[in-house]
Image (cartoon, helix red, strand yellow):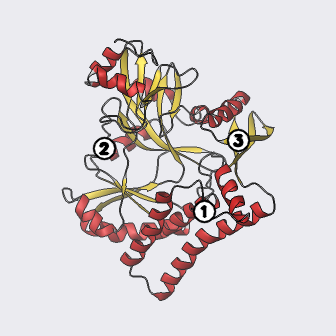
Amino acid sequence: MKNSRNSELNIEKVAEFLELPPSKISDLVEKGNLKRNWDEYYDIYRFQGHAPQMEDGTVLIDHHGTFELVRGFPKIKRAMLLEPALLNNFSEISSVSVEEKMNGYNVRVIEFREKLIAFTRSGHVCPYSTERIQNFLEPDFFREHPDLVVYGEMTGPENPYVQKEAYGIESLDFFVFDIRYKNTGEALPVHRRRELAGKYGFNQVRLFGDFRINSASSKITEIIKELGKKGREGVVIKDPAMVLQPMKYTCSESNCSDLKQAFKFYNEAGRDYLYSRVIREGFQSHEWSENEEEFRERCLRLGESILLPMKKTIEQVESGERISDEFRIRVKDRETIFKFRDYLDRFGLYVALGEIERKGDEYVAEIKKVNKSTNDKTLAMLEGQLWS
């Protein structure tokens, strides 16, 4: 049973590396929970779904019989009420480190075959992110620290997943928020990571400071209110030693921005995604003891973020338009544009490639992602179908 018929992996060697029975590895492959990546990344496999002791998106790299793991990024839980969450989750330590949570999409970066590559949260190698990451990170870091993985946020307006203008970025940039060891996923302590990333000139998420537990809630609330005014997302609160699990806390404005985008494509967005953001608003309003005017402002912000984009979607579909998510990407290699289009096609997305313009030594491409489910659902309702 050395090899599964759907994979060239040496099942026994993988099982030995992961300390699992060979039958379990075969089962993961057969059920599609351990899948080979596409194209030239045929020696890279990703875990998805129900894999024992593996975060979704964990990557297994086959070096012709020896292996490495790039662990998926651990899911960070969210504080609904800030003060009790701080006291409950960080009771063992005296202070917490608070860093900005930036609004974009996170990737993990390693060196593979003498080139930096970027894994998405799901463990795919994104061709666009991989090309762009060459501009942001110093390859010497990975050659001098081959056992480390850099985790960071891709953010900016030329972003195929989350287009944000809030950071004063012209195109796209990358901000480090974590560095972890391969195989174990153990994280470097906050200040050690910042020191190491700074040594190589990496952009990093903003550090607001270390705050004593008994005063952290009021400090973080002030930070959140200021970030909200600027259209930013929120903060991640961490044990400086990175032993205890971090937690995140977001701005009302960010919740509403997410809802505004999601309700434009209401039939694509997951209901848990929508519902959780509404719930956050209720808890934050309660904890902040808002007066009548503040509460009314929150209600108006929340209601408009839900109804305005949805009403516009209905009007557009009724007028014969097909709603779509439009974005642009900027690359040096023109071929990356077509690789990225094919990459999105593989996920079953309806993608239309628009104008490609040469700007200096780069190419800027307009891309339209048609949201078929919301278009079809809206048209059906307009034609008299019932909601089921």
| Residue 145 seen in render | no
233 horizontally vs 167: left or right: left
229 horizontally vs 383: left or right: left
Label 2 secondary element: loop
137 horizontally vs 319: left or right: left
Which residue carries the number 1 mark?
Answer: 263
Q: State how far apart marks 1 and 2 are (Cα).
A: 39 Å
The dot on residue 189 is 2
Q: Quadrant of the C terminus?
A: bottom right
Foreground disc of the pair 1, 2: 1
User: Above or below — where is 65 with respect to 147?
Assistant: above
Which residue carries the number 3 mark?
Answer: 351
Q: State how far apart marks 1 and 3 are (Cα).
A: 20 Å
Which three-letter amino acid code belongs to the residue tagged 1? Phe
Q: Earlier in the sequence, mark 1 or mark 3?
A: 1
248 horizontally vs 159: left or right: left
Q: Earlier in the sequence, mark 2 or mark 3?
A: 2
Residue lying at 59% horizontally and 53% vertically, measured from the top left: 268
Residue lying at 34% horizontally and 46% vertically, measured from the top left: 190
Estimate the x, y position of residue 108 in percent, counting from the top left.
Answer: 46, 36
Which three-letter amino acid code belongs to the residue tagged 3? Val
Which three-letter amino acid code belongs to the residue tagged 2? Pro
